[in-house]
Amino acid sequence: MGFVKVVKNKAYFKRFQVKYRRRREGKTDYFARKRLIVQNKNKYNTPKYRLIVRFTNKTIIAQIAYATIQGDKVVCDARSTELPRYGIKAGLTLPQEGDACRLQAQELQETAHVPSPEEGTSRPEESCFPCSAIIGFKLF
């Protein structure tokens, strides 16, 4: 057996760059995140809104957010614990409750002074608040 050169020596580790913490934890795919949040250059600093749905053990959280260089800004959020005020009393962690939280968050965007799309759309589904969705995983 011949001599095998050690590749990972002190010089190797001096130049080794550690990945971002959320990448190491497997929580964030930065390749996909970049393509999701980058706005077109001809839109000049207009925020690109996205709907984030997070499932916890007890509640569902829906947030409308946009990205800036300093960090993400949350415009408004809705939680499934607020749904009993609207007449929904049971099952606050069901997927149907997540959809109700989404609708509630989109109603809250009107009170948060988020500009709505232009008037005069021909179809009613075009008058909805434009944002892309990020939905967390929940195993049932």
Image: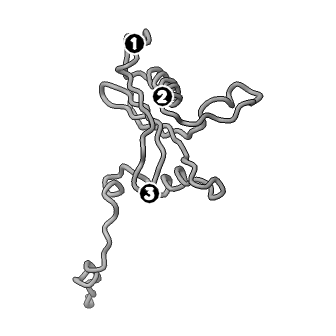
Of mark 3 and mark 1, the one earlier in the sequence is 3
Quadrant of the frame with the N terminus: bottom left
Q: Residue at x 58, y 49 (%)?
A: 46
Q: Residue at coordinates 40% horizontally, 17% vertically from top-left? A: 83
Q: Can you give x and y, in whole percent of width and height, for residue 99 in the image? A: 49, 24
* Residue ID at (43%, 31%): 62
Callout 1–callout 2 Cβ contact below 8 Å = no
Residue at 50 percent of width and 56 percent of height: 34
Label 1 element class: helix
Of residue 32 and residue 73, the one placed in the foreground of this image is 73
**Spatial separation of the CA atoms under disc 3 and disc 1:** 37 Å
Residue 69 shows which numbered tag?
3
Q: Residue furthest bottom?
A: 2
Pointers 3 and 1 in contact (CB under 8 A)? no
Q: Quadrant of the C terminus?
A: top left
Q: CA distance from mark 3 to mark 2?
A: 24 Å
Q: What residue would you read off at disc 1?
A: 85
Disc 2 marks which residue? Answer: 105
> Callout 2: helix, strand or loop?
helix
* Residue closest to the eye, 29 or 71: 71
